[in-house]
Image (cartoon, grey):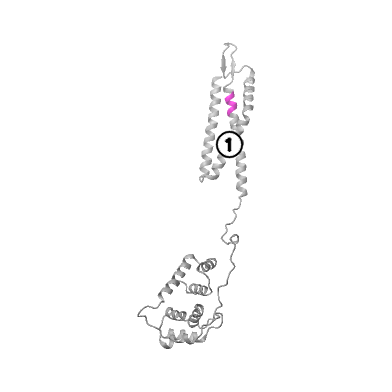
Amino acid sequence: MVDEKLINFIKDGFDKEYTEEELKSILHESGRKPGEIDEAFIEINKEKEIFKKKPGERSIPHEVESTPTEIKPIEDPTKELNPELLDYVKKALDAGYPKPQIRSALLAKDWPNNQIDLAFSKLEHPIRKLAKPIIEKKPVTKPEESIFKKEKSKVNGKKIAFYIIAFLIVSAIFSFTFILFYYVDSIMEYEVVDPTTGQLKKGICLEEQCTDMKEHAMQEVKTKVTTSILYGSGAALLVVALHYFVPFKNLFVWLINIVYLVFLGVIANMWVVFNKLK
């Protein structure tokens, strides 16, 4: 059932020349639910249609119906309720006529809607004092001052710091791993001339403790340092970015660990194969 107070509020607003949109805006700001507001407006529109007099409809008795013609409408709705209007409404109610029909008859005589509501309210609750008008004209709010404007998103400093630190750590690990890969690969590709056969051979060295092989590998690694850092940083950036966007973060971390361990396994296998060739 639609709240009677809400309906009276809207009718009072129409009397003060508020538009339907302005009234809806005021009600939304006061916390009223949209469905409740729409229901109230539908109910008021129904009343306007139903209260039109139809053929065969019982009319108000002459002694009651003639009263509004003898009473001048109140110009100022804030003044005290007219006793003659109150008497007219009381007679009509005592005669058994419904409120909508009484309201329709009074509106036809240019009586303000809020005065009619006050008369009904006075008769239903005689002890309660008449309330002052509840609608006040509000200034139009500028778009930038609207209460519905979006709040500025707050930057999560801790989260940003976490990903920066993670990027630096992962980048360092990946870069070192690429350098290790190039070092092992350089040792495996090292070739020398066998002094006994005069042929080029891989996996052997001429000097004690293989210092010649190690020096060759270190020279090759120095040329690959920049490449290793670029590869490591690129791979780290990709991993950190994917971790930020994917919903299954724990599973993603496990997958990256597995891929990294496989790469380490490839390097270890290269070292084992090299030792077998020696």
Point out the stretch of residues depicted in magenta: 181-186
Q: Nearer the viewer, residue 74 or 1?
A: 74
With respect to residue 227, does 168 lie above or below?
Answer: below
Amino acid at pointer 1 = Gly
Q: Position of residue 169 (x, y in %)?
A: 61, 39
What quarter of the picture does the N terminus occupy? bottom left
Q: Is residue 183 magenta?
A: yes
Q: Quadrant of residue 212?
A: top right
Q: Is residue 112 magenta?
A: no
For disc 1, the neighbor class at 10 Å (few under 14, some 14 to 19, many from 20) is some
The residue indicated by pointer 1 is 234
With respect to residue 83, does 154 lie above or below?
Answer: above
With respect to residue 149, does 226 lie above or below?
Answer: above
Tell me if 106 is positioned left or right of 168 in this view.
left
Residue drawn at 59 percent across, 27 percent down: 182
Residue drawn at 47 percent across, 86 percent down: 69
Q: Nearer the viewer, residue 5 or 89?
A: 89
Q: Position of residue 100 (x, y in %)?
A: 43, 78
Callout count: 1
Q: Quadrant of residue 210?
A: top right
